């Protein structure tokens, strides 16, 4: 087995197990057993469990932020003022869509992102801020410009309300879609759900009061 194969197997196993069980509940031994490698391989390639967690997020966040940057550049280049809907469409349709194109599961990404908040991982927050902070600040800055007159604290809360709704919807997509099918006899693809999410999230950010 090549080193590249070993790293991929470890990351694949860690990604699935972390999303299913959480970070604290998943041991390195469980990951190595699932990946079919020994514990020394994790220590050699990643150094620690914290660095393995960071590497799992990097596989999602790098293509996500790269696709978002390209889309924001395209929209800004038009010279037209960006609306809240424009920006949310960029992050939902393009950035999340980029994960699908690269074979990464958006639902799993959202589960992991939710766990990053509910199972506080200080090292992970520092890693994300250090590596992807510029991308976040650019998007949040453009969003704030599209919401003139909104004070910073209210903007902060609405941004995280929107993020919470996004994480819940996409991380639970299979279950929500199953309920939709059972109760209404209707179906919705991930793409259709993202399209519905744009106006709902936009309204959450723009509501008066």
Image: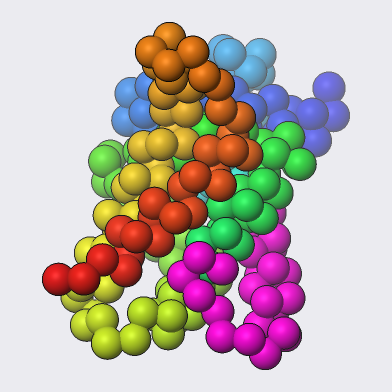
Seen in the picture, residue 97 relative to 108 is either above or below; the reply is below
Magenta stretch, overall SS = helix
How is the structure coloured here? rainbow
Q: Point out the stretch of residues depicted in magenta.
A: 63-86
Residue 131's quadrant in the figure?
Answer: bottom right
Q: Residue at x 39, y 51 (%)?
A: 200
The extreme right residue here reads 2
Do we see residue 69 in this rendering? yes
Residue 33 x, y percent position in the rendering: 56, 12
Q: Residue at x 48, y 54 (%)?
A: 198
Q: From the image, which quarter does the N terminus lie in? A: top right
Q: Residue at x 72, y 84 (%)?
A: 78
Do we see residue 27 in this rendering? no
Residue 145 x, y percent position in the rendering: 42, 85
How many numbered badges does the structure rendering display? 0
Residue 42 x, y percent position in the rendering: 59, 32
Name the foreground residue: 67 vs 144.
144
Residue 30 x, y percent position in the rendering: 48, 16
Q: From the image, which quarter does the C terminus lie in? A: bottom left
Apparent side of residue 185 relative to residue 79 in the rendered image (left or right): left
Seen in the picture, residue 100 relative to 146 is either above or below; the reply is above
Residue 25's quadrant in the figure?
Answer: top left
């Amino acid at each position: 087995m090549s080193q590249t194969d070993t790293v991929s197997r470890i990351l694949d196993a860690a990604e699935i197990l972390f999303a299913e069980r959480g970070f604290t509940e998943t041991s390195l031994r469980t990951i190595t057993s699932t990946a079919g490698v020994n514990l020394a391989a994790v220590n050699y390639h990643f150094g620690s469990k914290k660095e393995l967690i960071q590497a799992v997020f990097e596989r999602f966040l790098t293509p996500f932020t790269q696709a978002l940057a390209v889309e924001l550049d395209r929209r800004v280049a038009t010279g037209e003022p960006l609306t809240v809907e424009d920006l949310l469409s960029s992050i939902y349709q393009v950035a999340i869509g980029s994960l699908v194109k690269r074979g990464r599961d958006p639902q799993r990404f959202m589960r992991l992102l939710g766990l990053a908040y509910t199972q506080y991982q200080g090292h992970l927050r520092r890693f994300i801020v250090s590596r992807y902070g510029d991308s976040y600040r650019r998007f949040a800055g453009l969003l704030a410009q599209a919401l003139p007159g909104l004070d910073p604290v209210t903007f902060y809360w609405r941004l995280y309300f929107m993020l919470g709704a996004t994480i819940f919807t996409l991380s639970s997509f299979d279950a929500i879609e199953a309920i939709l099918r059972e109760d209404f006899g209707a179906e919705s693809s991930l793409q259709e759900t993202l399209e519905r999410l744009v106006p709902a999230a936009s309204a959450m950010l723009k509501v008066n009061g």
